[in-house]
Image (cartoon, grey):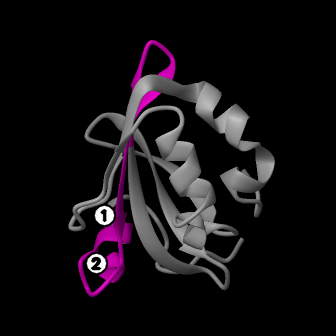
Amino acid sequence: MGGRSLRSRASAAQRGAVLHEDGALSMPPHSLRLRGRADVPAFLCGPGRGCHGSRPVPLTANGMPAFGQYRAGGVPWALQAVEITDGRITGLTPFLDFLDFLDTERLFPLFGLPPRDEA
């Protein structure tokens, strides 16, 4: 995927097109829960744009597609679980290194991810 973020590659309409009509985003431990092709992309382009410019690295978690995410400078900060049904995203669950919720130093190597991204 290179150094470009997923958001920089696609418009909000294109991102919404790969999302199932009932696709959902939740963000533990926060109470954030969004659903649908309008609300999820709107959040990702608005308040959720904090991950703009980060680099996703594909992996598998619990047999499902996922990715580790690195901020500019190679700092790990999120694991994203992706649920897919019939070729469309039905669920996005990011686990963020926020207020020590996600111990990236310990967890990233368990998924085969380096402690820092040098790409």
Residue 83 visible in the picture: no
Kindly check if marks 1 and 2 are in contact, taking CB atoms under 8 A apart as contact.
yes
Q: Quadrant of the C terminus?
A: bottom right
Query: In front: 4, or 27?
Result: 27
Name which residue lies at 78% across and 47% down: 9
Q: How many residues crowd mark 2 within 10 Å: few (<14), some (14–19), many (20+)?
A: few
Left or right side of 26 for 53: right
Relative image position of residue 6 (x, y in whole percent): 68, 51
Report the amino acid beneath label 1.
Answer: Leu
Magenta residues span 82-108
**85 in relation to 67, above or below:** above
**75 in relation to 81, above or below:** below
Query: According to the image, label 1 marks what residue?
Result: 110
Q: Is residue 95 magenta?
A: yes
Name which residue lies at 76% across and 64% down: 3
| The image quarter in which residue 79 lies | bottom left
Left or right side of 97 for 13: right
**89 in relation to 1, above or below:** above
The dot on residue 106 is 2
Relative image position of residue 93 (x, y in whole percent): 34, 50
Q: How many residues crowd mark 1 within 10 Å: few (<14), some (14–19), many (20+)?
A: few
Report the amino acid beneath label 2.
Answer: Arg
